[in-house]
Image (tube, grey):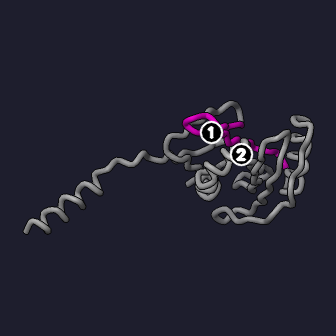
Amino acid sequence: MKKTFLSVVSIILLFSITIPAQETFTYKASGIDITLPAGWFYEIEDENMTAYTEDETLGVNFTVLKAADIDAALTEVDYMLDTEFDNVEIGEAEDIDVNGMYGVWVDGYADGVELLFAIIETPKNGSNLLVMAWGIPEVIEKYAADIRLIITSIEPSK
């Protein structure tokens, strides 16, 4: 009887532990829904959104690009990086599927920080979503699971 009671108490305690909730919201400028990990916060200005870790050591930027296709969007991102940074080294774009939306994944470095970004074709014609994370390599590694959660959570708005 004691063993059963302890098992029931253990199960109740296991399910009563509060887990901080993730936040899912619609990013109207791109016609998509995004889920941010628990504890993250964000700011939206015009068609740009930036999400930050609770300790503010990592930022993930969401920018709507008015580009006809992924190649045009990559050209736009190359230009943006070249105007913002002095030393930019990016790898080859890899095709990805994000919940039925075509995109590309690219990683690289700029002025000593690691860059990870995806460009995703959005449901809105003539626009693509640039999702870019940047930070020192240790911080990128620390939040790699959160970055993956964000990218894989992106889906067309319901």
The answer to if 128 sits in the magenta stretch is no
Residue drawn at x 57%, y 35% as measured from the top left: 55
Does the rendering let one see residue 29? yes
* In magenta stretch: residue 51: yes
Residue in the picture at 59% in, 55% down: 145
Left or right of residue 12, residue 137 in this image: right
Give the mark, 2 or 1, whose residue is nearer the N terminus: 1
Q: Nearer the viewer, residue 44 or 124?
A: 44
Give the residue type at disc 2.
Ala
Tell me if residue 68 comes above or below residue 28 in the rendering. below
- Name the magenta segment's main secondary structure: strand
Dividing the picture into quadrants, the one containing residue 10 is bottom left
Q: Which residues are magenta?
A: 48-67
- In this view, 84 is above or below 121: above
In the rendered image, which residue does mark 2 sit on? 133
Q: CA distance from mark 2 to mark 1?
A: 9 Å
Q: Residue at x 71, y 54 (%)?
A: 122
